[in-house]
Amino acid sequence: MTDSIVKTLDSVGNAPYFVVALLVLMALTAILTQKNLIKICIAVAILGSSVNLFLVLLGYRDGGSIPIYYLKGAEKGMVLPTPQCLTLTAIVIALATTALMLSLIILIHKHYGTLNIDEIRRLRG
Amino acid sequence: MKLHEHLPAFLVMVPLLGAFLTPLVASFGRVVRNVFFVFFSLLTLVIAVSIGMSVFGGQILVYVMGGENFALTLPSGMTYPVRILFEIDAFGALLILCIALAAFAGSVFSINYMDRFSGWKRFLSLYFLMTAGALGMCATGDLFNFFVFVEVSSIASFGLIAFWRDKPETIEASYKYMLVSQVAALLLLIAIGTLYGRYNALNMSALAAMARTGTLDRVVLALIISILAFKCGAFPMHAWMPDAYAETPSGVTCLLVTVSQASFYGLIRVCYSIFPGVAREGTVGWILIVLGCMSMFFGVMMAVVQHEIKRLMGYHSISQVGYMLLAMGVGLLALDGRGNAAAYGLTAMKGGLFHVMNYSIYKALLFLCAGSLYYATGTRDLDKMGGLARNMPWTTGMFVVAAAAISGLPPFNGFVSKLLIYESSFVVHPLLPAIAMITSVLTLASFVKVFQSAFLGPAKTKFIAVREVPAGMLTGMMVLTVVTLLLSLFPGWFMNNVFTKAAEALVDHEGYIRAVMGGGM
């Protein structure tokens, strides 16, 4: 089982990193071009997910085993569990910010009656 | 157990404890809540001062979280630190002192200022969280931990900017800041992840020990510099700053100023301590100088035309950040220069660090004065104010001190730090001090305008009933005024005992590495 996973991962090479780059670019493009606040919020969430994917990818090392002592099997070396910890922390932070962002969007809709950023322009100059 | 050895942990623990005790304590009534608020802020300040006292003596404080021994940076058999640790050198302690001072003054001020409003539990919790986040940013020795503290302080500040949520402007300002801040934070995480992928370490000292000067390091450094320059409000990325500063309750604005200073800390730490090899080559120094000059000049140009007092001060913050970026950029360029350029570089850094402290203190004081005006008159529009010096003599006096300090008038502390920057940036290019001086003149011009239109002139009939603000607000402002006057009267003492130590700590990046890595690597 483990061998087949390793073989698959070897055959894909750097492809996951390209996926990360693609997602980041997609998210940034959407943040810059979209006019709807909800869509911008979705774009930020995509950006967060792509960063998490990136962190998880960093945890993979050739020939390393999972960092759980009684599950690591015959492998000698375990990978550092740091990226997994980073990802967990980043997910929690992303959850908090997404919730806060959505609640601000609700308040904006209450005050302005619109979600179009071109119409929400009281702070100027 | 010796208590003073655990000070770095207490520094973040005390405000965090305050944040989570708030909902409980606030239900015991107004007096208990106010005493609790001020006491915890004062306790944080005391801790910050005692950290400063041991660090400015020449020691670097290191504190390992969750290890068998808090002083054991390298666990047995490990060649680099795996645990999260705090590392406070003189530069970090300087920023910690500024943040704790502003937090204390803001808390005393807010007791009266926020008394008319409900939502105290949330206000206090967020205030303490923001303090904890900002202090953590300046204390941590771990890059990912830095990201976490950035997020803690940012999320708390989103909530506090939108605190008066019945006003559309506050929500708009908060959303704007949140969007750009979130994107910046996630890009920062990408940069940190890339560093981890390259060096297998997140500890700042370990990274500094291993840092090479490859292309990837340059890309990451560029990413981090642009993100943190944005977070501290440098010119092309400044749009969030006046909005956020104008719409926040004033007691919080003075803390928000120091939170942006904490981002400045991160920027300087990365340039000077982690990647000195790449940063001192020249390009990075010039980038900081150009960013600084643009922020100085355009910030003050936009400030001059403002009619709303807090927006005006928000634009001034951009121009003040420019001074520090300029000074630190000159430091990066000149330190490795020939002849006595290195001495000029060190002078520029001392001036820049002096300005960091000055800016945090007098800017906080100015925002508190603006808050007092808003509290007394109910407006932030300078055109509607007038003749208030008769009604509010104390506020007027303290505003004059702060305005003279920010404009760099000779007896005040702003003059000292600006003079050091003028006389040292000359070594890089003679145009730089010229830009800085023009900025200073325009700063004076716009504060003369504020003073004239708010405090002088004939008394207006609608402001006849206006009285001096309550004692709590005056006390908060008085704390900052006293610190400004101390910095003005004894610049030599502060220079020798604080700013020189901080500048030397920044230059000595090997000492920063040695404090954690010992003799290893």
Image (tube, rainbow, N blue to C red):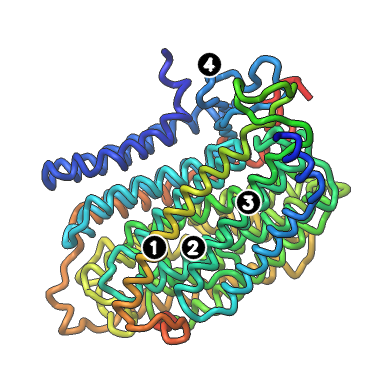
For the point 73% across and 51% down, which residue is it? Answer: B331
Residue annotated with mark 4: B68
Tell me if residue B437 comes above or below residue B8 in the rendering: below
Q: Identify the amino acid type marked 4.
A: Glu
Establish whether labels 1 and 3 are both on one chain: no
User: Which quarter of the picture shows residue B208?
Assistant: top right
Establish whether labels 2 and 4 are both on one chain: yes
Residue in the foreground of this view, choosing between B92 and B489: B92
Number of callouts: 4
The secondary structure type at the circle numbered 1 is: helix
Residue in the foreground of this view, choosing between A42 and B427: A42
Q: In the image, which is nearer the foreground, mark 2 or mark 3? A: 3
Residue annotated with mark 1: B366
Q: Is residue A8 left or right of residue B133?
A: right
Residue in the foreground of this view, choosing between B15 and B498: B15
Instruction: Identify the subunit bearing mark 1.
Output: B
Residue annotated with mark 3: A53
Q: Is residue B172 left or right of residue B409?
A: left
Residue annotated with mark 2: B406
